Image (spheres, grey):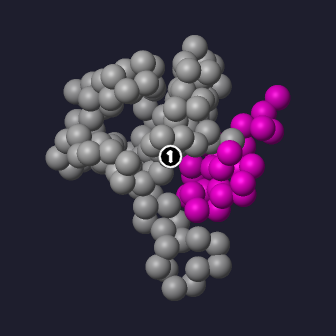
Amino acid sequence: MRNEHNEVQTENSEQYMWRGSHDPSLGVVSIWPGVLVDADDIESGKLNEFFKNHYDIEVIPIGSVFTLPNKGDDSGETGGRSDFLFYVPHQFISKFAVPRFQIGVRWWEDIYFNEGQDIYPPELLEAFPDPTLED
C-alpha cells in the first residue's frame, strides 16, 4: 500500500480491483483516495495489519477503482487516480471516525453529499449507490 500520507508498504504487483455490491450489514463504505492496494496486500494480511497497528480496527476490503476525469474536463488531464474502497465494520466506526482524516479516508456518503460521485465509473455507482437514499 502506498500513498502521499504513508511510506511504501509493499512493491506494486497486481492491483486489487473492486468487486461486489453494497451490503450495509458489513459496515460503512469508506474510500481512501490516491492509494494503491495490490492483491498481495489483501492476501498476505498486510492491509488489516496496517489498520490494526495504526488504528486498532479491522477493515473489509472492497477493492480499487480508477477515477474518471473531473466533470467538464475535456482535456483528459484529470482522472486515472487509484482510490481504494473498504468497509469499516459497525463496531469500529466511532473509533475510526476522527483518525481516518490523518490518511484522507472519507465515508462513501460524503462523496455523494459533496457531489463528488461524477469521477467514479457508473458501474461502481450502481453497485454502491448513495447510502443516504437507502431505506
Give whichever of 122, 68 is nearer the camera. 68
User: Which x, y percent locates residue 115?
Assistant: 72, 57
Q: Which residue is mark 1?
A: 104
Query: Left or right: where does residue 111 sit relative to residue 45?
Result: right
Identity, as a three-letter code, of the amino acid under mark 1: Gly
Q: Residue at x 54, y 41 (%)?
A: 101
Up-down relation of residue 52 to residue 14 (above or below): above
User: Which x, y percent locates residue 38?
Assistant: 28, 43
Q: Range of the magenta residues?
A: 110-135
Q: Residue at x 49, y 80 (%)?
A: 76
Q: Residue at x 68, y 45 (%)?
A: 110
- Magenta-drawn stretch, dominant element (helix, strand or loop): helix
Q: Quadrant of the N terminus?
A: top left
Q: Can residue 58 be seen here? A: no
Q: Secondary structure at mark 1?
A: loop
Please check the rendered image and state whether residue 8 is part of the magenta-colored stretch, yes or no.
no
- Furthest-left residue in this view: 11
Please check the rendered image and state whether residue 122 is part of the magenta-colored stretch, yes or no.
yes
- Furthest-top residue in this view: 91
